[in-house]
Amino acid sequence: MKNELRNHAEEIFKAGVERVNPANLLSRVLSVANNHLKIKTDTEEFSVDLSVFNKIKIIAIGKAASSMAFSLNDILGKSITDGLIISKEQSTKALPVLYKTLISTHPIPDHKSEEAGKKLLDFCKNCTNEELVIGLISGGASSLVEVPGDGLSLADLQNATELLLKSGATIHEMNCIRKHLSKIKGGHLSQAIFPAISLNFILSDVIGDDLSVIGSGLTAPDDTTYADALEIVKKYKITSKFPVAVVDYLEKGNKGEILETIKSGDSRMMNTKNVLVGSNKTALKGARDKAQELGYETIILSDKIQGEARDVALKFYSFSRQVDSGALMKLPACIIAGGETTVTVTGNGLGGRNQEMALAYLTLMDEESDLTTKQIFLSASTDGGDGPTDVAGAFADYSLMKNAQDAGIDPEDYLDRNDSYHFFKKVGGHLITGPTQTNVCDLQILIII
């Protein structure tokens, strides 16, 4: 039964990921008829007359860049005159030769990110109002393209990003700072594209689907300020650890000595249109449909799960106890949720937020004999990579607890050292999918029978 539960949890997760496969998303939202590109989402419907443009350029940036570009190429075909793809991995499929592909780095920007950022700006400069630039933007873009602000080095941005990743800051907070240290984020890419028409299809990897946060708002106006960025640094008590050049830069910006990010109402945004084509909520619906197909009473808890990963694990475990007592749902039951948690790193281990959550859940589980039900918990990233590791996430069930006991391994010790990756590598609880070519935050699946 335990193997069946694990198989079911994996099937439910993969159904959620498949629902946000870019080919499925874009073919549902976009179509071409009579030389018009028709766009229809759950919230808006409009069309673009392609015949009025002498060039149609494609820029694709993010973990889903290649798959989104393939999908759009199938839809537009020979109408496309030029293309630039910036992704984390090399695609196994070949696009027409007009596309140039750059492989960049995530989650800490490096020289590849800076090179990609500069080439992206070069690709977009000198565009005219007779050109259409279609952007395909997905999670990971914040790291994959970077152009540091004047006077800042790439090393400054690397150190700042690494500190933020370990601080427990949310993606909204991290990207507020990233936007204010960059010459390409916070609407600056749209500024470079102007006066051409900028039409962008965006796959959300942030809670609440805030377009100014996804990819650090490459093509979206940003209404946060340098003062907001400084407050975030102070909030997490990392001012003294931040590179001096970064703190100085933010303080100069706060005094008005450095230009702000592009704000709402700026004339340079007047030709920009951003369209949300998929999100965590989309994936949750796919997961729910599969769970119901497998015979589970299913609820979607939320698409806005956030906070410390181990605190969220405690909330999920409390739900399992309520189901076990018969107070919440009928059996067999499946609780599904999504979002993006954080980890405040205090140890020197290896892991990611999903593995940390699964390990924290495991430490909470009682002996199987204490429960009338059996259960399994899975937390995993929809992009197939949890933190700086090669796995999507991890399971928590009694068989893993027994494996740990038989091997003399203490889950609490590994949790204290933020070393969830090596714990699950030893006891066998990893979910490995490889790159999924999409990215809409994380999914959590709790099955109880």
Image (cartoon, helix red, strand yellow):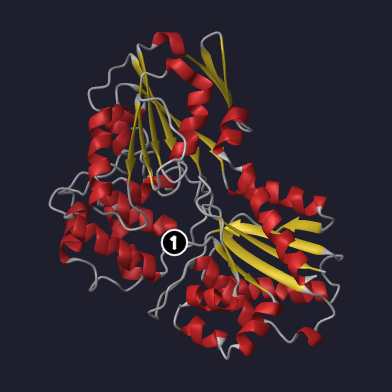
Left or right of 218 in this view: 313: right
In the rendered image, the quadrant that contains the C terminus is: bottom right
Residue 41 is drawn in which quadrant?
top right
Relative image position of residue 368 (x, y in whole percent): 77, 83
In depth, the one of 425 and 44 nearer the eye is: 425
Q: Is residue 375 visible?
A: yes
Relative image position of residue 395 (x, y in whole percent): 63, 69
Q: Residues within 10 Å of mark 1 (few under 14, many from 20)?
A: many
Q: Check disc 1 and give the amino acid type.
A: Thr
Residue drawn 70% across and 75% down?
318
Residue drawn 42% across and 55% down?
172
In the rendered image, the quadrant that contains the N terminus is: bottom right
Give the number of marks. 1
Against 386, residue 202 (above or below) is: above
Residue drawn 45% across and 43% down?
138
Badge 1 marks a residue whose secondary structure is loop
The residue under label 1 is 170
Relative image position of residue 237 (x, y in whole percent): 32, 74
Residue 310 is drawn in which quadrant?
bottom right
Residue drawn 28% across and 35% down?
120
Q: Which residue is most to the bottom?
A: 408
Relative image position of residue 64 (x, y in whole percent): 47, 42
In depth, the one of 393 and 130 nearer the eye is: 393
Q: Which residue is most to the left?
A: 151
Left or right of 236 in this view: 181: left
Q: Is residue 40 visible?
A: no
